[in-house]
Structure formats: C-alpha cells, structure tokens
Amino acid sequence: MPADVAHSEALARRWCASCQIVANDQTRGDNAPAFASIAKMPGFRAEKITQFLMDPHPKMPDMQLTRDKAGDLGAYVASLARWRDLPK
C-alpha cells in the first residue's frame, strides 16, 4: 500500500513539531534539523527514516509507530525536498 503523505503530515505536526520544523508554515523548532533539510541531504531515502523511526534515538519519545505509520512519515519527509526556502 502506498504511503499516505497527507495523513503523515498530521502525524508529524502532532508528534514531531515541538522539536523539528515539519511544515513550510511552521516558524520554530528546537535544535533538531528541519524535515526539509533532512530530505535534501545527499543519499536521503524515505526508507532510512522509516527504519530510524522504528528504533528512535534516546532524545526522541517512543511513539510506538507501526511500520506503516513510520513509512508514511518517511514519505512525508521525502516530499519536503521540493521546498525552495526553509522557514527561518
């Protein structure tokens, strides 16, 4: 089943926006990189985010994501590579 990018934007806003800039209309995040910056990193692939989210680093809360939701979030991050200007 293809990833649900629209649904995962809502997930990102709910779970990730307190630390990261997850959408173009967001102006503040913590010290974590913006999703669009992550998407533009050389060698980025949505599958890497999916795998990372299944076993997040210690500073991240354990969101108990299913593989499908982690895949949706990975696809959402990948969709942000098209942003021309990052929020400041």
Image (cartoon, rainbow, N blue to C red):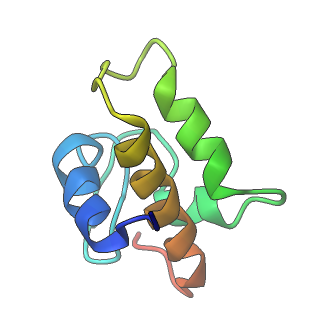
**Quadrant of residue 52 in the image?**
top right
Q: Residue at the spot x=51%, y=54% of the render? A: 74
Q: Residue furthest front?
A: 1
- Foreground: 88 or 79? 79
Residue at image coords 35%, 76%: 24
How far across and down, in percent of the image, does residue 25 sit? 26, 77
Q: Quadrant of the N terminus?
A: bottom left
Q: Position of residue 19 (x, y in %)?
A: 32, 40
- Vertical comparison of 82 with 21: above or below: below
Reply above or below: 43 against 32.
below
Q: Is residue 84 above or below residue 55?
A: below
Residue lying farthest to the top in this orientation? 58
Residue at (30% x, 20% y) in the render:
61
Residue 9 placement, left or right of 52: left
Q: Position of residue 88 (x, y in %)?
A: 41, 69
Going 74% across and 57% down the picture, which residue do you hit?
A: 44
Circle count: 0
Tell me: residue 81, above or below residue 85.
above
